[in-house]
Amino acid sequence: MQALSPPPSSSSLSSSIVGTSRRRRPPTGPLVVHCIHRSYDSVNFPAGVVSSRSDWQSSCAILSSKVVGQEQPPETADSIASVNGHKTIDLDLVPIDKAAADGTATVGKPLTITDLAPAPMHGSQLRVAYQGVPGAYSEAAAGKAYPKCEAIPCDQFEVAFQAVELWIADRAVLPVENSLGGSIHRNYDLLLRHRLHIVGEVQLPVHHCLMALPGVRKEYITRVISHPQALAQCEHTLTKLGLQAAREAVDDTAGAAEYIAANNLRDTAAIASARAAELYGMQILADGIQDDCGNVTRFVMLAREPIIPRTDRPFKTSIVFAHDKGTSVLFKVLSAFAFRNINLTKIESRPHRNRPIRLVDDANVGTAKHFEYLFYVDFEASMAEVRAQNALAEVQEFASFLRVLGSYPMDMTPWSPSGGD
Ligand SMILES: O=C(O)C(=O)C[C@]1(C(=O)O)C=C[C@@H](O)C=C1
């Protein structure tokens, strides 16, 4: 492994390094998209793609208030329009017949070159936004999803969404769940808040390394820093290694390695990828420290336009819905899929932000407070299938709000334990 000298840091992580604070946004300054232009030749990132941090620092672009100003109001059940006393459900479906007939994926909009081509023309690369800095697992996921893409690091998930909305990027690749650490709730909330469509998924084996500056021994380590998901995924192994070290959360795994290198911290270790160790000149103290060798993170790819669902390969569909008639309705909603033999692969509930609590008056027992939820469901069927359309028509009967987040090809890559990143 080629060890590089510690690169200079472009930003201080100090505001996010303490406690559980994970954001690195300057208190009053603009949001920043660190635009780093690199290409991938393969998922394995041949050494030397980036020779130094200054390489990519030099191509940074600061997209200031433009990004901040575009925030959209949260989209919740309360924003559902009422037409003639009937609720209108935002199905967000691609009109399959029309789309198939005239080749357009969106009604009412002129056809553009991006509707026709999955990637930009004339040899230009697909620009893919991800959260983190080079060496982050999200960057690897972007490379797996789009092997020859230009990866654009963003300092927050929100910025990755906005980069696509503002045409700075063509796609965003964001983690939604991990086999050990569970769901990345922030991204579920952002999926609803933004108008992007899920157009694909990738599952990435995640292989963590414990790393420190060259010459630092495990006994000197008093603190381990990483992304909260990575800390959670290595919790037991860290204890088994006998480290007497405090765990602290930062924005991303590779950013943790970068921070240690930039600040010459000899009492701190990071959990990150082998590629991050190489990029930031760190020495690997322990390899494969995830608590389970089958540690996998699932990422979704987001685009401004949905893809046209098909039936010639396995598809998954992601929806989010709310209902307002108590928990027994949830059973009825889910039966719509069971009756049609449609497998559910995931269900996640999140607080209904605009109406988190419903008061239920009962003459005998008084007033009860029920929590209100939004339910995110993934199911194994394409929206081009009649059984999926019928299932959603039935869900609509019980839902006060329903949105299809996307219908997209399933990642069918054969499973293999995480042996590298
Ligand atoms: O910090 C990184 O390297 C990331 O890409 C983020 C992230 C996550 O959010 O789950 C991605 C994959 C791993 O599960 C750990 C961290």
Image: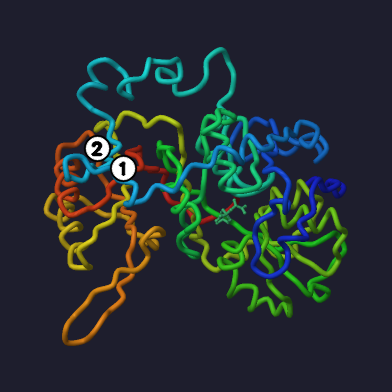
The number of numbered badges drawn on the structure is: 2
Looking at the picture, which amino acid does disc 2 mark?
A: Met
User: Residue pushed farthest front?
Assistant: 84
* Residue 86 seen from this side: yes
Q: Which residue is identified by label 1?
A: 404
Q: Quadrant of ligand 1?
A: bottom right
Q: Residues within 10 Å of mark 1 (few under 14, many from 20)?
A: many
Proximity of marks 1 and 2: CB atoms separated by less than 8 Å: yes
Q: In the drawing, does residue 234 fall left or right of residue 305?
A: right
Q: Nearer the viewer, residue 293 or 250?
A: 250
* Residue 143 seen from this side: no
In the picture, the disc for residue 21 is none
Respond yes or no on whether mark 1 lies under 8 Å from ligand 1: no
Looking at the picture, which amino acid does disc 1 mark?
A: Val
- Where residue 51 appears, as percent x and y from the top left, is 80, 36
Residue occupying image coordinates x 40% and y 40%: 198
Q: Which residue is identified by label 2?
A: 383
Image height of 395 relative to 68, above or below: below
Residue occupying image coordinates x 27% and y 35%: 93
Q: Nearer the viewer, residue 29 or 63?
A: 29
User: Residue 365 appears in which quarter of the rendering?
Assistant: bottom left
| 1 or 2: tag closer to the N-terminus | 2
- Where residue 26 appears, as percent x and y from the top left, is 73, 51
